[in-house]
Amino acid sequence: MAIGSPGTAQRWQVTLDRADAVFTLRDALRSHGIPADAEGPGVVRLETDKPRAELEQWLGSWMGANRVHARLDAVDALPLLLPPPPADAPPRLGELLVRKGFITEAQLAWALTESRSRSEMLGVVLVRSRMIFEDELARTLSEQLDIPYVSVGRIGVDRAIARMIPAEVGARAAAIPVRPSGDAVLVAFADPTDPGALDAVRTHLPRIDVAVGEISDIRLAWQQVGGRV
């Protein structure tokens, strides 16, 4: 059954019980000329002028064929858990990794589910599962966030600067001060998107320039500085 007919377009959200089916649904919708995007583990957003009853009928047929359970909600009626990203927002990490060919969309769908179930960052899941290398993750985060990439293992750290924060704080935050940066300190983070890590470091170093580094290099650097990880 084709979907889409003249009328006023409505935005919808489909929540699936299987994250690995997200891209299958997205592609099925797109094949019918419906703009659709995967918005996270188990979530597809779409826009169509199809009446709800007919959209639910099509979705019901798709669910039966794919053995997936899904819930359809009108987006405007949903409470927003997060504000929508601005139009000029950088691409998401998973999207960039797929674009670069480091992982497939199926691997991303699995990793997003694993990330949510374990309360781990997506990058940590991907590295732990050996889907990507640490330097691929670090360089992609650098591009995504528009911050410097620092090869801590190659350039080393200024030990006096590193000791400006307690080793246990640096270990928990997976971060290490590298060198002075003007009137601030350049700090390499394994995950610069972690607000807890940023806050922990800023407790001791209020003025920092954020960079991204590889977690194994950061851990080794703390061992060389004399701290524990």
Image (cartoon, grey):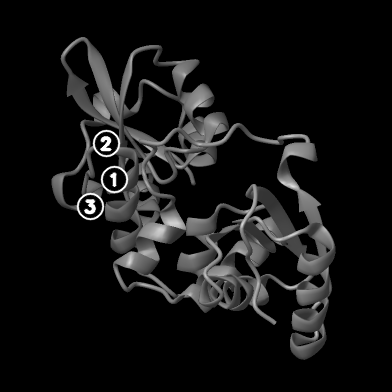
**Helix, strand, or loop for circle 3?**
helix
Residue at 54%, 64% in the rendered image: 125
Please give left or right for residue 177 compared with residue 5 in the image.
left
**Helix, strand, or loop for circle 1?**
helix
Q: Residues within 10 Å of mark 1 (few under 14, many from 20)?
A: some
Q: Is residue 225 above or below residue 23?
A: above
Where does the image place residue 162, in percent across and percent down from the top left?
A: 31, 29
Q: How far separated are the C-alphas under marks 2 and 3?
A: 18 Å
Dot 1 corresponds to which residue?
142
Q: How many marks?
A: 3
Residue at 76%, 66% in the rendered image: 55
Dot 2 corresponds to which residue?
147
**Helix, strand, or loop for circle 2?**
loop
Residue at 63%, 49% in the rendered image: 9
Indicate the amino acid at tag 1.
Ser
> Marks 1 and 2: CB-CB under 8 Å?
yes
